[in-house]
Amino acid sequence: MQHFICIAGNVGAGKTSLTKLLAQRMGWKPLFEPVDHNPYLIEFYQNMTRWSFHSNVAFLSHHARQHSESLRTNTPIVQDRSIYEHAEIFAYNAYRQGYMTSRDWNLYCTLYETFKSLLPIPDLLVYLRASVSTLIKRVAQRDLSFDRVTSVEYISQLNELYENWISRAVSCKILTLNTENLDFVNNHEHLEAAISNILSVLPSKSLD
């Protein structure tokens, strides 16, 4: 099995950009967050209480399917958002905010723990850290329908959960990059420095 790297971070942290650029630069296979493949997402933002469980289970199944690809490829994989953070941050936040009942949350956790027990642990989890103000600024610059429903309160809730989560995240190697003043897309030096940091901490597997 080749390297399996997860890029983690809040909305607007730069996960998708780094995933795409890292894959292009290294010839790795990118796995992007399956937002377009969630059949409940539109309904979720119209009625979060009604559709939260369905939407989160859809994300969970897609992330698990993506994660399992690391078992079937000879090409290193870089994944945009891990199954761990979606479950332990986004789904948990939905439950915490009252959008999921205790019964649904318990079933969701059972599904998540089952998937987690069957999936390989990533070789490296790269956490992209940024302040709430920076994240909000970046989100405002994007033209994605999903981003239009975000708010300062929501980003703040997620950021608090991310900071708590990263201190007890899955038992794999973790690299934290402070992206407050980084621009992977428009600054080649920033990108090369990030790639260098990532390569320096990867376990010793062949990258061929």
Image (cartoon, helix red, strand yellow):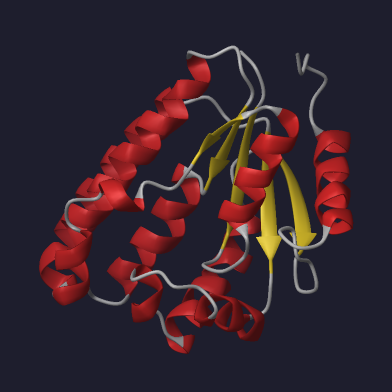
Q: Quadrant of residue 167?
A: bottom right
The residue sitting at 42% across, 32% down in the picture is 66
Is any atom of residue 105 visible in this view? yes
- Name the residue at the left extreme: 50
Q: Quadrant of the C terminus?
A: top right
The residue sitting at 27% across, 46% down in the picture is 37
Left or right: 206, with 119 as reference point: right
Q: Quadrant of residue 3?
A: top right
Q: How many marks?
A: 0
Residue 46 image position (x, y, % from top left): 15, 75
Residue 109 image position (x, y, % from top left): 30, 47
The residue sitting at 14% across, 66% down in the picture is 43
Q: Is residue 175 above or below residue 138?
A: above
Q: Nearer the viewer, residue 54 or 75?
A: 75
Left or right: 157, with 101 as reference point: right
Q: Quadrant of the N terminus?
A: top right
Is any atom of residue 101 visible in this view? no
Left or right: 191, with 147 as reference point: right
Q: Nearer the viewer, residue 75 or 162?
A: 75
